[in-house]
């Protein structure tokens, strides 16, 4: 066991994001000490396979010397340069250009942030600026999706539709509207893909009508809803929603903070679906979690409208650490890794993971297995026929997480009894097999 003093120091001083403060005080912290490849080692020396890549972010895996070298080199040469007021650094310019080259369609302009929440937040500001510049400032209403997650910034948390991110904060989100999740397993229209797509289209149309078409600014969607429980809409859903936004004359933002950078196979899930939104938000895999960075991709027509609207005035949106040169240097190195085998390995490992999880379908607790690439979920139920979820109030998810940990596996257990998988793309066959075997043991212990 690691030292009690560390646990006490944590208890006394470190506030943990998205945790029950009282629950955490009782449980105490689990400290990770080191990691390599897809294996993490905790402070007591226990080795675990990281089936969740940190927080869906360490796509390249741990311990890449070339990433460390890229950061160190940049720190020695130029650890900081602002991008404010038209200044800049070479890595940021090069990364923006490399990314723009690979982004779908005319998403040619890149705005760097520190992570996903401020990437989403930035789009909200840019969307409002865009409509003001177009002479339609009354377009100030936003639509997103139930069970969606778009970060926890003060404004962007409004787009998030998970109750814990709203309850108790007392921040009004009356400019936010939600449509139902395209959740095939639990959709009132059933699991038929075309029916699920039609239901989402009808819901978006109806919502825009209800709000007033001249008031709606934008619609936000994750290509796969991550934090809601890895909810995978049918193929064609994203494209259909994007096309409808265009028809309705509202902006469409694809939040690829999780799905971007190889998580579902390609660099962008939008490319695979043939979708060119007005913005894409990314973070996580952009730097593989080694240093913080997010990126907003902006379509050329949006950029031109904002630029013309501002004219000689500054567009007053920025952070001290926007386009940080060390993060950009890491981003450039990680991009090389993706294209020198990492995406390819992720696709192979993802197929092995999905096949292995599918084989668990006969387990009495497994209601559904779903996923794409290296992003997957196993939804547990107490009654398969009626799809009765595990009881959230019994802390079932927490117990499964703890059990998996004891079995040497890090996964995410969502409150609704969904187990989430997002392993590093560098996983070997042995890593994937360990994830599968340890999942099976954990499920048997949960019976
Ligand atoms: N958007 C999505 C889809 C996410 O999954 C997340 C984080 O998980 C965010 C935004 C927020 O990103 P961050 O935690 O880097 O602020």
Image (spheres, rainbow, N blue to C red):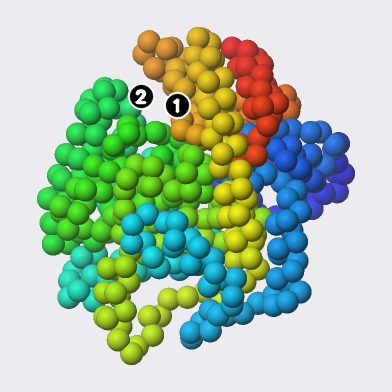
Query: Badges 2 and 1: C-beta atoms under 8 Å apart?
Result: yes
Label at residue 185: 2
Which quadrant of the rendered structure holds the N terminus?
A: top right
Please name the residue shown 27% across and 68% down the image.
301
Q: Secondary structure at mark 2?
A: helix
Please name the residue shown 20% across and 40% down the image.
201
The alpha-carbon separation of the residues under discs 2 and 1 comes to: 9 Å
Which numbered disc, 2 or 1, marks the residue that appears first in the sequence? Answer: 2
Which quadrant of the rendered structure holds the C terminus?
A: top right
Compared across the picture, whether 187 is left or right of 385 comes to left
On the image, the x and y values in percent for residue 157 come to 42, 55
Label at residue 370: 1
**Would you place residue 98 above or below residue 134 in this image?**
above
Compared across the picture, whether 196 is left or right of 151 comes to left
Please name the residue shown 15% across and 52% down the image.
247
On the image, the x and y values in percent for residue 349 come to 59, 31
């Amino acid at each position: 066991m690691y030292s009690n003093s560390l646990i006490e120091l944590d208890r006394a001083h470190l506030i943990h994001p998205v945790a029950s403060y009282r629950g955490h005080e009782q449980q105490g912290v689990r400290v990770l000490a080191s990691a390599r490849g897809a294996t993490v080692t905790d402070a007591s020396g226990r080795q675990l396979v990281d089936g969740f890549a940190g927080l869906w972010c360490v796509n390249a895996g741990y311990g890449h010397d070339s990433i460390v070298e890229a950061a160190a080199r940049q720190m020695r040469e130029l650890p900081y340069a602002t991008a404010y007021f038209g200044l800049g650094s070479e890595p940021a310019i090069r990364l923006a250009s490399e990314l723009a080259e690979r982004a779908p369609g005319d998403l040619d302009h890149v705005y760097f942030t520190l992570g996903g929440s401020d990437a989403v937040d930035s789009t909200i500001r840019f969307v409002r600026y865009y409509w003001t510049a177009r002479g339609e400032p009354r377009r100030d209403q936003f639509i997103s999706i139930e069970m969606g997650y778009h970060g926890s910034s003060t404004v962007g948390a409004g787009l998030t539709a998970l109750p814990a991110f709203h309850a108790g904060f007392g921040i009004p989100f009356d400019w936010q509207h939600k449509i139902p999740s395209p959740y095939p397993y639990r959709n009132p229209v059933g699991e038929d893909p075309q029916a699920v797509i039609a239901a989402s289209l009808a819901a978006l149309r109806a919502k825009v009508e209800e709000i007033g078409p001249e008031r709606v600014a934008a619609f936000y969607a994750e290509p796969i809803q991550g934090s809601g429980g890895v909810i995978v809409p049918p193929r064609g859903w994203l494209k259909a929603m994007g096309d409808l936004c265009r028809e309705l004359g509202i902006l469409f933002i694809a939040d690829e903070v999780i799905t971007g950078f190889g998580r579902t196979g390609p660099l962008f899930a939008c490319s695979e679906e043939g979708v060119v939104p007005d913005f894409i938000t990314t973070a996580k895999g952009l730097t593989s979690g080694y240093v913080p960075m997010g990126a907003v991709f902006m379509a050329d027509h949006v950029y031109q409208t904002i630029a013309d609207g501002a004219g000689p005035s500054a567009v007053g949106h920025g952070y001290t650490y926007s386009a940080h040169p060390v993060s950009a240097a890491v981003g450039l190195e990680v991009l090389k890794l993706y294209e020198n085998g990492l995406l390819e390995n992720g696709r192979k490992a993802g197929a092995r993971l999905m096949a292995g999880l599918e084989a668990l379908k006969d387990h009495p607790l497994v209601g559904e297995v779903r996923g794409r690439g290296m992003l997957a979920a196993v939804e547990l139920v107490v009654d398969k026929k009626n799809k009765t979820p595990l009881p959230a109030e019994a802390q079932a998810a927490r117990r499964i997480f703890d059990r998996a940990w004891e079995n040497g596996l890090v996964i995410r257990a969502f409150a609704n009894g969904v187990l989430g998988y997002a392993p590093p793309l560098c996983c070997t066959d042995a890593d994937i097999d360990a994830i599968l075997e340890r999942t099976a043991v954990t499920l048997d212990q949960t019976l």
